[in-house]
Amino acid sequence: MTDYKTSNNPDEADALEFDIDDNEPFSYADFRIEDWVAFVLFWLLAITLFSQFLSRYVFSSPLGWTEELARYQLVTLGFIGACMGVRKNTHIFVSLFHRWMPKNLSTNIYRFIAVCNLVFLSSLAFFAWQIIPLIEIHKMASLDVSVSVLYSLVFGGLVLMIFRAIQHLIGMFTSNPNAIDDSSQNSLD
């Protein structure tokens, strides 16, 4: 693994350029289920916020449920976005020292981090599963819906993240070390 800033390879030197090639063909196959759920949820959130703005500032009669619903939609959208980040391996990480480490050490560190991510997501899903029945009696402030619905959506997002993390981990252990280095370099872009 080398530092692309000091590399003599012209392909790695192009990483510093900001010219983006827009000639990639569009394909619906590039999108997964979490992309479509995020798309729909984003527009539902936009409609909710627009109705809140319209009712409050145009009709001077605010709809009380829109603020709470928008908050819960935003939380759900955040977890769906995290699913997309886990799938693409674009979560935030510190990449300072791995560039100067030997490839074997760097590869093993990436594998260890992937296992830690999976353990962390699994523990979050376990706690979300534990809390859902405990808060089923609590209702939202403005809607007659249980708060456990929100935690169920969070749990669903965590399960999808676990699934994507397992896919990534299997790919790391079944591929060669150079593929791991390439995927980590792509996550920096």
Image (cartoon, rainbow, N blue to C red):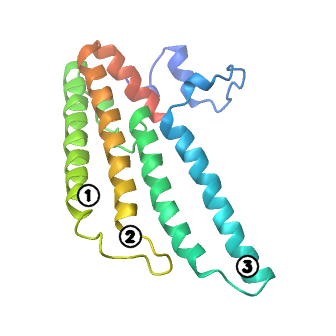
Q: Residue furthest right?
A: 58
Q: Residues within 10 Å of mark 1 (few under 14, many from 20)?
A: some
Residue for badge 2:
146
Q: Label 3 sits on what residue type?
A: Ser
Q: Earlier in the sequence, mark 1 or mark 2?
A: 1
Return the x and y of residue 60 as percentages of the image width and height. Answer: 76, 87
The label nearer to you, 1 versus 2, is: 2
Q: Is residue 69 above or below residue 127?
A: below
Number of disc labels: 3
Return the x and y of residue 35 as percentages of the image width and height. Answer: 54, 39
Residue for badge 3:
55
Q: Label 2 sits on what residue type?
A: Ser
Q: Is residue 92 above or below residue 30?
A: below
Q: Is residue 140 above or below residue 27?
A: below
Q: Is residue 169 above or below residue 118?
A: above
Return the x and y of residue 167 as percentages of the image width and height. Answer: 32, 27
Q: Residues within 10 Å of mark 2 (few under 14, many from 20)?
A: some
Residue 1 in view, yes or no: no
Q: Label 1 sits on what residue type?
A: Ala
Alpha carbon distance from label 2 to label 3: 25 Å
Element carrying mark 2: loop
Residue 87 in view, yes or no: yes
Q: Earlier in the sequence, mark 2 or mark 3?
A: 3
The label nearer to you, 2 versus 3, is: 2
